[in-house]
């Protein structure tokens, strides 16, 4: 009876009971539950990508994106002095589209294609099944987290992964920074509640001069990823490519956003039914990776990065058969589209050559 009741209870109802019993939760916990709860989390229960889903990503717009990422990986492998074997790892591969396109392009460097061992880090069993379809015929290992990856030189790729890792928010009040916790609103929904928090001490000093009401976003989960990647790359050799939307300099601002059916949705409404993300603070991510011992290259705007890798020429060639490719090109590189909001950042061991596109 109890088990049955739990299964039939919505995620919102479970969070409500938990808050009523144990008190308000931080936004990171709320995001983690909304996105990754194994029974009712957003990613666990659906394929969110594409026109019929809630959002579209660069690899789903055009094959050119994954192909250029594959060529980038092959070039970086050569900068690494061509280790064999080398792990090629993708974090949060979605439908597996980017990796399928990247592998096709990587095959133009046969020695790289032979040397690479493919590993995918995916929390959602639903999306893992989708990736297995896209990559059928390709040998690969799946992991729930980075912790179980094998040792050795590694090339890590992550597109729109970091934005899905939980953030926490603080608001500046007359008496200093207070954390925004998630509480029940008494009417069956959720609301923010301000509370004193040890996290206040971690708000960068550069944000201190802002006016009351300002929101600062911190993400222990993202910094932990930057630290883990930085350490791993320093120790094992390799590189990481992080592409996401975000800002280059730490700044105040509420970037928490939920999307449902390609439209904004209130972030605290019906957790688990909408995508929930926040912009990436590339300055904070880069600093954590640097402190872990990696060299950081970029961030570079996605439009500029793709153009340095030759996307315009590739598009012109593809457009001879399929003129619509030019529309995709503009979605990926134009300033009003994904070209400037999205950024690319690379990590490499100290002294390794600058990865392509980051010169
Ligand atoms: N990279 C893909 C998908 C982006 S959506 C693309 O560009 O189309 C985010 C992806 O990260 C999904 O595959 C989601 O299931 C996965 N994900 C989110 N949080 C995760 C976590 N903590 N651990 C592992 N995978 C996660």
Image: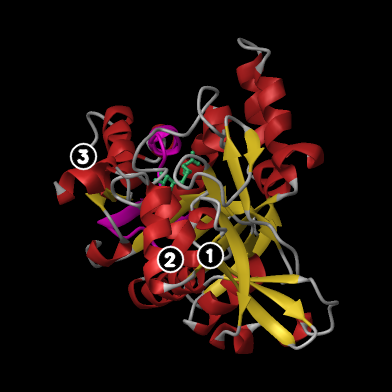
Q: Position of residue 322 (x, y in %)?
A: 62, 12
How far apart marks 2 and 3 lie (CA) works out to 44 Å
Residue 100 is a magenta residue: yes
- Residue, x 74% and y 70% (percent of image)? 249
* Mark 1 crowdedness (10 Å alpha carbons): few <14, some 14-19, many ≥20: many
- The residue that mark 1 highlights is 183
Tell which residue pokes out farthest to the top in this image: 321
Q: How many marks?
A: 3
Does residue 51 belong to the magenta stretch? no
The CA span between labels 1 and 3 is 46 Å
Describe residue 217's horizontal placement relative to residue 144 as left or right: right
Name which residue lies at 52% across and 84% down.
Answer: 291
Mark carried by residue 19: 2
Q: Where residue 314 sits in the image (x, y, percent)? A: 62, 28
Question: Left or right: where does residue 149 sit relative to residue 70?
Answer: left
- Where residue 242 appears, as percent x and y from the top left, is 53, 57
Residue 130 occupies which quadrant of the picture? Answer: top left
The residue depicted at 75 percent of the width and 78 percent of the height is 172
CB at mark 3 closer than 8 A to ligand 1?
no
Q: Secondary structure at mark 3?
A: loop
Circles 2, 1 touching at the beta carbon (< 8 Å): yes
Q: What stretch of residues is rendered in magenta?
A: 76-103
Q: Nearer the viewer, mark 1 or mark 3?
A: 1
Q: Nearer the viewer, residue 319 or 78?
A: 319
* Residue designated by label 3: 139
């Amino acid at each position: 009876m109890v088990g049955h009741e739990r299964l039939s209870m919505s995620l919102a109802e479970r969070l409500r009971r938990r808050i009523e019993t144990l008190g308000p939760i931080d936004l990171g916990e709320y995001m983690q539950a909304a996105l990754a709860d194994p029974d009712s989390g957003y990613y666990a229960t659906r394929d969110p990508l594409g026109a019929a889903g809630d959002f579209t990503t660069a690899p789903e717009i055009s094959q050119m994106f994954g192909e250029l990422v594959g060529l980038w990986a092959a070039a970086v492998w050569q900068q690494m002095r061509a280790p064999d074997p080398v792990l090629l790892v993708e974090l949060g591969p979605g439908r597996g589209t980017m990796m399928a396109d990247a592998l096709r392009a990587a095959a133009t460097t046969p020695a790289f294609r032979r040397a690479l061992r493919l590993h995918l880090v995916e929390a959602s069993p639903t999306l893992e099944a989708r990736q297995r379809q896209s990559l059928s015929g390709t040998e690969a290992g799946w992991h729930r987290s980075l912790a179980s990856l094998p040792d050795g030189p590694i090339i890590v790729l992550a597109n729109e992964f970091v934005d899905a890792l939980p953030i926490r928010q603080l608001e500046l009040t007359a008496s200093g920074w207070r954390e925004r916790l998630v509480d029940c609103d008494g009417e069956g929904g959720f609301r923010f509640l301000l509370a004193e928090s040890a996290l206040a001490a971690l708000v960068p000093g550069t944000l201190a001069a802002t006016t009351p009401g300002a929101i600062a976003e911190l993400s222990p989960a993202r910094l932990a990823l930057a630290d883990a990647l930085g350490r791993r790359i320093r120790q094992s050799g390799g590189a990481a490519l992080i592409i996401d939307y975000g800002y280059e300099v730490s700044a105040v601002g509420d970037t928490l956003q939920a999307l449902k059916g390609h439209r904004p949705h209130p972030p605290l409404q019906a957790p688990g039914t909408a995508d929930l993300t926040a912009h990436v603070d590339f300055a904070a991510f880069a600093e954590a990776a640097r402190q872990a011992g990696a060299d950081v290259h970029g961030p570079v705007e996605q439009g500029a990065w793709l153009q340095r890798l030759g996307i315009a020429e590739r598009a012109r060639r593809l457009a001879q058969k399929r003129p619509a490719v030019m529309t995709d090109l503009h979605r990926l590189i134009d300033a009003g589209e994904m070209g400037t909001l999205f950024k690319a950042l690379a990590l490499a061991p100290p002294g390794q050559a600058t990865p392509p596109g980051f010169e």
